[in-house]
Amino acid sequence: MHTLSLRGLIQALQTKKLSSTELVDHYFKRIHKAQALNAFIHLDEERARELAKEADKQLQRGNAPHLTGIPMAHKDNFCTKDMPTTCASNMLAHFTPPYNATVVNRFADHGCISVGKTNMDEFAMGSTNESSYFGAVKNPWNMDHVPGGSSGGSASAVAARLVPFATGTDTGGSVRQPAAFSGICGLKPTYGLISRFGQIAYASSLDQAGLFANSADDLAIALQAVAGFDPHDSTSINQPVPSLTEQLNHPIKPLRIGVAPDFFSQVDTEIQQAIMDALKVFEQAGAEIVDINLKLRPYWLPCYAVIANAEASSNLSRYDGIRFGYRTSHAENLRELITKSRSEGFGMQVKRRILTGTHVLSSEHFDTHYVHAQKVRRMIADELKQTLSTVDVLIGPTTPSCAFKLNESHCDSPKYQLSDQFTVPVNLAGLPGLSIPVGFNHALPIGMQLIGNHFSEARLLQLAHAYQQCTNWHSMIPGEWK
Amino acid sequence: MTITLEHFKKIADLAYLDTQDAERLLHEANVVLKQIDTLHDVDTTNIEPLIHPLNPSQTLRVDEVTENSCVDELAHIAPTFVDSHYLVPSVMRGK
């Protein structure tokens, strides 16, 4: 069952060749066998099995929504009123929200069954999933390596076929980078396409809910279910969502692909070769490759660092040990209560970002650092939009290297510092970005990123789908998890 | 620009974090701040700050009451909550 695509599973359920009870049972058996991956923080097995029985009754009646009976998983920073929502932090280790995120409700309304909450970097801050309070997640392709982060649990679970698809969040690459490291497809949609209501905030002007699946086709099905305006989110965009699944098979010609030489500097040779090989597939289909120049590339990472840390510092000020979340066991006064609760509740990665963010927001540095970075951000966004007015899509590697070894990343190591260099500009400009698998280096997956203009998800998925009709990287399953 | 431990402890105080955290994280923060400094090579004269990536007009909801009291839910998630109040240590000195 786990080798079927999401589309295949939907057909099997709707035609009653398979029951949701069987499917949920099958996936839970796989999840229990894969405990060593540490992909889940919380499992909701009893409720999932009850929902599967209900789904089967509905499927029998013949009035079941499209995704009825399909198991899935949510990253643990989407609020769920029936399950804890920890953000992989001691701060929220015992927190169960009083409401569901819109993303959670929409998938439930379409009939999906959430099997549990996936592990992640604490408060979605990290690129390795090692900052989780609940321990590191392992890469199914090689257990000595990380799955990427921050949505590492979702990526690991989808790669090991523990669920057909999963949600993630992407502030600077937290869907695309783990998708690349784990050999699956990961989509960060246009800012505002998916509601952020109930998605625990990290950096609000960059945060976007995203999706993991094994193919562009499966991503299109999942995105169709969850995208669209939400009055609860003031940054949600009020415009109709096109029919993504219908457009998937449209012909891709004529197509102009922008490729920047900069995309290949400081990138592993094997990754460069895999991207060149993938570009040849598009060329053979009639695409034109166009050299582009992105002059502001050196400023992508520092601009992101200022804005992400500043917004993190502001968003995480709500955790005070008073209203919800962790509270220290002993404090003499109010100030000590808040300080001790925060210092004991947050991990070091989170505290580093809060402190750096507080520094750039402090009165003497606000204009020189924060406002200046917002101006550079506009220049970066304008340069990308200008470039995307001359080509249909930008293509390059998602990451400069394959998955790091566990415990080898340090914030001042060049490899770690540069790991997000190709993913952050997408968030700075609010663009959609899609990572798809295009090969392997020493048995670790390689990801290729496609970047399009605002609301061009249909186009990106269509291109990825066309590529996946000619290649089989997306259908490869890690040996141990076949 | 490198920041001093003294300054970073003040930042920790502003952020309601322990000053020991500032000591442990000073080096890592300086690595990030060094990277951030390169932004000053960019001339941003006459450039407006970008606050929202799509620059849409702000969506406002209709000015209607949409929520009832949710005191019970809030009480349920609070560390200590009695008679509709959050309990905290004494704020007044000597109490």
Image (cartoon, coloured by chain):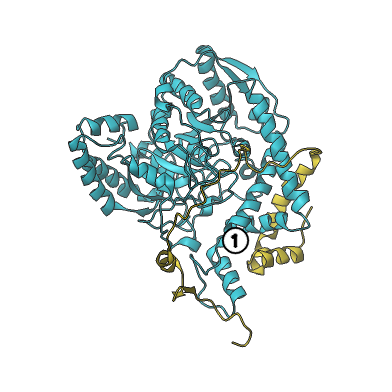
Chain colours: A cyan, B yellow
**Residue at the limit of the structure toward the bottom, as seen here:** B94
Q: Could you tell me residue A172's position as x and y percent?
A: 58, 42
Quadrant in the picture for residue A71: top left
Residue A144 visible at all: no
Position of the C terminus of chain B, as image quadrant, is: bottom right
- Give neighbour class at mark 1: few <14, some 14-19, many 20+ (Cα, 10 Å): few
Q: Amino acid at mark 1?
A: Ser
- At a point 67% along the width and 22% down the height, the residue shown is A292
Q: Identify the residue at image location x=18%, y=37%.
A: A61
Please state which of residues A251 and B74 is positioned toward the viewer in this rendering: B74
For residue A349, side relative to residue B44 (left or right): left
Q: Specify the quadrant of the image occupied by residue A365.
A: bottom right
Residue A283 location in percent, x, y?
54, 14
| Horizontal arrangement in the rendering, residue B80 relative to residue B16 (left or right) | left
Tell me how many marks there are: 1
Locate residue A244, reporting x and y percent. Answer: 43, 27
Which residue is the site of mark 1?
A317
Please give left or right for residue A149 compared with residue A5 in the image: right
- Which of the chains bears the disc numbered 1? A
* Foreground residue among B29 and A191: A191
The location of residue B51, given as percent across then percent down, is: 66, 43
Circle 1 — which element?
A: helix
- Does residue A373 appear in the picture of this structure? yes
